[in-house]
Image (cartoon, rainbow, N blue to C red):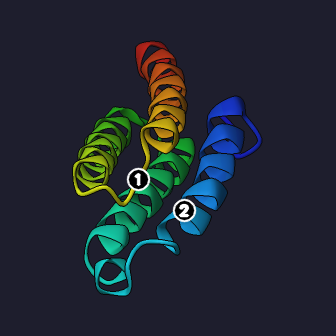
Amino acid sequence: MSAQSPIFIKTEAFMVWLYDHTAKFPRHERFRLARHIEEAMVAFHEQLLRATQAESPKSYLKEAQIQLNKARFYLRMALELKYTSPNQFQYASEYTTEIGNLLGGWSKKA
């Protein structure tokens, strides 16, 4: 798997959208909830990069799944707290589902 594969392209595009989105959170939440969302996605991306270099990528892909699930949880919190609109949440959900499906496919191959 290379850094130009679909999972990397989708993840990086989602992260660009996500950084723009979380920058619009209320100031006090940019240092709390927004930071957690961003850190989870950065950790997800890092685990993908580690998996590309590993002889046995399974543990890195498993950790990536955990980080993606954390980001999903934090995004649901943002919706509940009304920092994310239902349309924005739907967009994020569709993106994370697609990324999750790509991750699942990679995990099955590994």
Please state if 80 lies on the left or on the right of 61 as rendered. left
Q: Which mark is residue 84?
A: 1
Residue drawn at the location 54% of the way across and 52% of the way down: 49
User: Does residue 11 lie above or below 45 as drawn?
Assistant: above
User: Residue 69 versus residue 30: which sits nearer the camera?
Assistant: 30
Q: Name the element at disc 2.
A: helix
Residue drawn at the location 50% of the way across and 16% of the way down: 105
- Could you tell me if the residues under marks 1 and 2 are in contact, i.e. CB atoms within 8 Å? yes
Q: Tag 1: residue type?
A: Thr
Please state if 104 lies on the left or on the right of 18 as rendered. left
> How far apart, in angstroms, are the residues tagged by discs 1 and 2?
8 Å
Q: Tag 2: residue type?
A: His
Q: Which mark is residue 16?
A: none
User: Does residue 60 lie above or below 6 as drawn?
Assistant: below
Please state if 7 lies on the left or on the right of 69 as rendered. right
Q: Which mark is residue 21?
A: 2
Residue drawn at the location 48% of the way across and 19% of the way down: 101
User: Residue 28 versus residue 102: which sits nearer the camera?
Assistant: 28
Residue drawn at the location 35% of the way across and 43% of the way down: 68
